[in-house]
Image: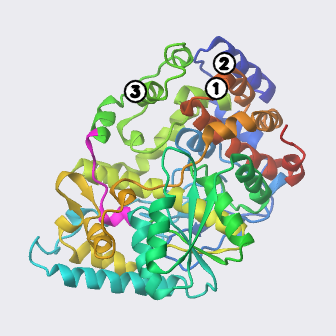
Amino acid sequence: MCVHHRASRALRGYRAMKDFQIDESCIQATSFALSSGIPGRTNIQIDTSPYLSEVDFSPVEGIQGDEVSIDPVSLADLLRNSFVYPPHSIYRNVKLAGTGFDPAQDMHAAPAYHYRFQSALARWRPAPGTVDENKLLETYHRLLCDSIALTTANMQAPWLLQSGGKDSTTLAIALSETRPDTTCFTYYGGREENEIPSASQVAKKLGLHHETLVCDPERAYDRYLAMVPRVPLLTADFAALSYADLVTEVRARGGDGIVDGLGADEYFGCPLHNTDRLLALLARSIRLPHALFTSRLVSRNFKLCFVLSTLQMNEFERFLPGSRFSDAEVDALLGCDISASSRQRLESFRSDIDAAQSKEAIRRISCTILESGMLAKGMYLARAMSLRLAYPYCNESLRDWVFHQVPDDHLIGPGGVNKVLMRKYIAGHFKDLPYVQSKGSFRFDLRGLASRRFEQVRAFAEQARDVMPGAPAWLDANRNFLGNKYFASKFYLLAVILPWLLDRMLGAKAVAHTKSE
């Protein structure tokens, strides 16, 4: 089936607001449209473990034009989940050995996934009340400081991405002793959560320099577009544009390294709360007509859209954050029935999922998968700005000690309180930090991006019809709903994905010449 026919069919499908079916040969046609082969290049496997001192992306740098071989199923992954299911990458011949995958395996074959840090596998963890708490806190502090010293050893001017939450506050405490030359950097992404007061209070008391950056979606997007040619692989994490803004600013202000607080959830644990349980019950893999979401009753209500979209997901994928494209939308965007192939990739994790002894254990697996995408964002964007990157929580000595030597009640407390040891560690230095009580993250002005850069992204979509024939139609059909975060989140995914694809297929000039209006 030719690309033009697929594009026309996708357009008709969106105008009618109906799902449509295309035979399996479309997947092959899509793959052909996305790839013209990779002359002279063989299969590539990259160890992307965050426990490495540095990940080598040199094998995939400089790929453009006739060398590009985009994996269409990975493209569906990005649209459905905002990241590519490991061990796959955006390129068909590039596989990544990340968390849960042994890099000694051939990632191009059928590699086995197994996460070794489930609570049920900690056979010799001490019972609650049998270990002196002060000794626990002292050991935790020492191991964290050792990890910071090791991971920042090659940095002359480290900058901590400080959200003001538990993970970054804990790092700030240890950094004040180990690397007092660290600058704490906080991003103000919008009115929903203001991390700055809490983060500023922490930095001031610890004697660390503190800087802030207020989100400007246009500035952030321009910075992302500028670095796209140097971003080795593609992910569409919902903090990617915030991260692009931050790392560009760090480089401009003289920093040479980023300290990132990701990596602890996987071994501290991922407790479920009532909202998580309710959403899991609602996830039923039901296909709903797109017209329901654009109806007058639903289209302006983010919470209602979010609940309805949950009905379309399976329970496992609802653990993943954000509002993403539905399977029907992905099939329409790519012009063929390909979302099922993306969903099938979840089967690589089925053995561990089936063996999980609790909902928390299943969520921990989802956390390892999700963090592969979140960690990748930092790896790709720091690489693009030639910045060193440290994940102090991704340290084997620290991880193994927490997993084997910290009692259960200091990992997950009553009522699903997470990271109890971290909370006690912080309490030894600060009292009643409000932002530590709730989750910290870097927000981004999704609606501002959609309102200010619609025409630019629409132009990208027009250029990328051969790859994503349904993108122009989706943008035209949903333009009036982008004031709702549910729709703006999907716009964000297109805004991140399309220019990277265009750069690889047509070169940097294709992106540079598509100016904002």
Q: CA distance from mark 3 to mark 1?
A: 19 Å
- What colour scheme was applied to this rendering of the protein? rainbow
Marks 1 and 2: in contact by CB < 8 Å? Answer: yes
Between discs 2 and 3, the one toward the N terminus: 2
Q: Name the residue at 58% across, 58% down.
A: 187
The N terminus, quarter of image: top right
The relative height of residue 177 versus residue 437 in the rendered view (above or below) is below
Residue 483 x %, y %: 61, 29
Q: 326 or 491: nearer the eye?
A: 491
Q: What span is in magenta?
A: 264-274
Q: Residues within 10 Å of mark 3 (few under 14, many from 20)?
A: many
Marks 1 and 3: in contact by CB < 8 Å? Answer: no
Q: Name the residue at 66% across, 65% down.
A: 247
Looking at the picture, which amino acid does disc 1 mark? Ala
The relative height of residue 456 versus residue 372 in the rendered view (above or below) is above
Residue 206 x %, y %: 44, 79
Q: Residues within 10 Å of mark 2 (few under 14, many from 20)?
A: many
Q: Secondary structure at mark 1?
A: helix
Q: 256 or 8: nearer the eye?
A: 256
- Mark 1 lies on residue: 332
Side of 15 relative to 329 (left or right): right
Looking at the picture, which amino acid does disc 3 mark? Leu
Badge nearest the viewer, 3 or 1: 3
Residue 452 visible within the image: yes
Between discs 2 and 1, the one toward the N terminus: 2
Q: Name the residue at 41% across, 59% down.
A: 112
Residue 145 x %, y %: 41, 85
- Mark 2 lies on residue: 14
- Mark 3 lies on residue: 311
Q: Secondary structure at mark 3?
A: helix
